[in-house]
Amino acid sequence: MNMRRFLAASCVGFSLIAAPALVLAVDDPMEMLPNPKDEARAEAIGSQLRCLVCQNESIEDSSAGLARDLRRVVREHVAKGENNQQIMDWMVNRYGNFIRLKPAFSFSTLLLWSMPVLALLLGLVSAFIFYRRRAAAPPAPPPLTEEEKARLDQLTKDKDNAP
Amino acid sequence: MSNSETPPNASRRRLLMALPLAGAGVVGVAFWKMLSGMEHGSFNPHDINAPVLNRPVPDFTLPDQPPMQGFNTQDLRNLTQPVLVNFFASWCIPCLAEMPTLMTLKDKLTMWGIAYKDRPENAENFLKHSGNPFSRLGSDHEGRVGIEWGISGVPETFLIGPGGVIRWHTAAPLTDDILSQTLLPLVEKLKAP
């Protein structure tokens, strides 16, 4: 392929990949924090917080009024120098664990978090049982009795003597 | 291995075939319980405001929303009688729909209103048209006090018990059924210590 054409194609490709990231950003540049490091941290926290209006979107993705307000609250707390845990706790204190897009590890979410490991173990155990059963040799037949031996001899002899 | 169906094998196969049926039965019963709970109001999968229950009201101060005087945390903590706190807005259709219900409550229960993300003049006009069941009114123009209370929209209603503790909450418009079955019995309980 022509090198220039390849470069043009990859530019288009990259912009397609980058497009959703641009949509993710806050809708008004005025909302953003001046320090890019702080802004990145605010976006990371916001992407873990559920918008309570459109419940399957994070507040960074949503354009609902409440999401915008919560984004501003997150940025204020980041600017104050609070750590991620403090900001998360502030939100959970007001909106409950439901606001976390990623459920916290606790007694009530133990089964949820251990499910991948449990499912893997269950699969391994059933696979182990299945293969062991299939590999097990069928039980050896009981040894021939004297009568049967005699009959077998007779039959093979007959066959040898056949024309 | 032989293909002959020996009796123990057959009963085991029957058991294995019954398993999915039993599983579907259990799931069915679970769904039925959830759906009937949603119908009776004992189970609400959208309820996101459980954390505020039985907690003291959050810290806030609200400026006056004409024609009434604003209020703050301390006003609610000083309460000796239950008060209903209702978040509303002039731009909110369900709020308009629940106003007649609130008006029927006016003589039975003290109600304080919070105009959420609303221009004071719009909220004042709204109350002129729909009637004003509130004895105090605060203006939460920025919506920041709403976040302190953990609301996700309007209307939302909180029942505040004596001492400023949140005793009940709903994120849906109030209906006559909710009043007679849930809210008023609770108010009676809180009034008679």
Image: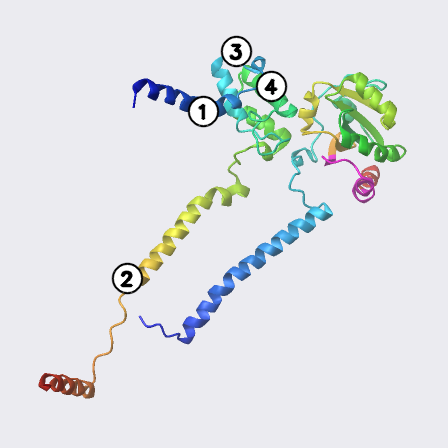
**Camera-nearest residue between A73 and B98:** B98
Q: Is mark 4 on a helix, strand or loop?
A: helix
Query: Which amino acid type is marked by label 1?
Result: Leu
Q: Is residue B93 positioned above or below A28 on the image?
A: below
Q: What residue is shown at x 75% (from left), y 32% (from top)?
A: B158
Report how far apart the C-alphas of labels 4 and 3 lie in the structure. 13 Å
Identify the mark nearer the N-term, 4 or 3.
3
Furthest residue toward top: A34
Is the Cβ of the residue at disc 1 closer than 8 Å to that at disc 4? no
Is the Cβ of the residue at disc 2 closer than 8 Å to that at disc 1? no
Quadrant placement of the C terminus of chain A:
bottom left
Query: Which amino acid type is marked by label 3?
Result: Pro
Quadrant placement of the N terminus of chain A:
top left
Name the residue beneath numbered marker 1: A16
Name the residue beneath numbered marker 2: A135
Furthest residue toward right: B107
**Camera-nearest residue between A71 and B134:** A71
Q: Do labels 1 and 4 share a chain?
A: yes
Name the residue beneath numbered marker 4: A72
Q: What residue is shown at x 50% (from left), y 12% (from top)?
A: A35
Taking the image as shown, residue A150 lies to the left or right of residue B100, namely left
